[in-house]
Image (tube, rainbow, N blue to C red):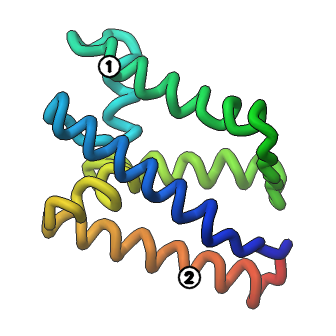
Amino acid sequence: METEFTPYWSLLGGVLIGLAATLLMALHGRIAGMTGILSGVLPPPATDWQWRAAFLAGAIVAPMVFVAAGGTIEFAVPVNTLPLIFGGFIVGIGVYFGSGCTSGHGVCGMARLSPRSIAATLVFMLAAFITVYVSRHVIGV
């Protein structure tokens, strides 16, 4: 599977993520970590579940608006369901023991120069590099 290089779309996406994280911090004093936001909506919901639900709805609706406006989203999963479930389970363990998800640490924590977030981001980026290298160059997926 070849990865398409899309610098303009990537830049736009990064700017929108940064803007959303900045507005959430400025207007609500909250970190834009998707795991924390989601956990505040699930039962029993947090007392401030309304903004969390709106944030999640925006994350779901935005790609739909993009496609409706004529954009395309290519998505392929090159593995079977079982490895996908296993990967999700491992990510969940990492989120729990890392005290947050990649969006919380990588976008918001690093912007606040949090040592814990910088360390967490270095670890998950290193794990991602190793995983891609092994899967593409050693295993040959």
Kind of residue at disc 2: Ile
Quadrant for the N terminus, please.
bottom right
111 left or right of 71 in image: left
Kind of residue at disc 1: Trp
40 left or right of 6 in image: left
| Residue at the limit of the structure toward the bottom, as seen here | 137
Residue 108, x across and y down, in percent: 26, 53
Q: Residues within 10 Å of mark 1 (few under 14, many from 20)?
A: some
72 left or right of 122 in image: right
Q: Label 2 to label 1, Cα distance in Å?
A: 36 Å
* Relative height, residue 118 to residue 14 (above, below): below
Q: Residue at x 39, y 38 (%)?
A: 35
* Relative height, residue 42 to residue 27 (above, below): above
85 left or right of 32 in image: right
Which of the 4 quarters of the picture holds residue 114?
bottom left
Residue nearer the viewer, 73 or 83 = 73
- Front label number (2 vs 1): 1
For mark 1, give the secondary structure. Answer: helix
Q: Residue at x 18, y 64 (%)?
A: 116
What residue did someone put label 1 on?
51
Quadrant for the C terminus, please.
bottom right
> Counting residues from the N terminus, which is met first, the one under dot 2 or under dot 1?
1
| Residue at the limit of the structure toward the front, as seen here | 69
Residue nearer the viewer, 139 or 133 = 133
Residue 33, x across and y down, in percent: 34, 43
Q: Residues within 10 Å of mark 2 (few under 14, many from 20)?
A: few
Q: Residue at x 24, y 41 (%)?
A: 31
* Relative height, residue 23 to residue 115 (above, below): above
What residue did someone put label 2 on?
130
Q: Residue at x 49, y 52 (%)?
A: 91
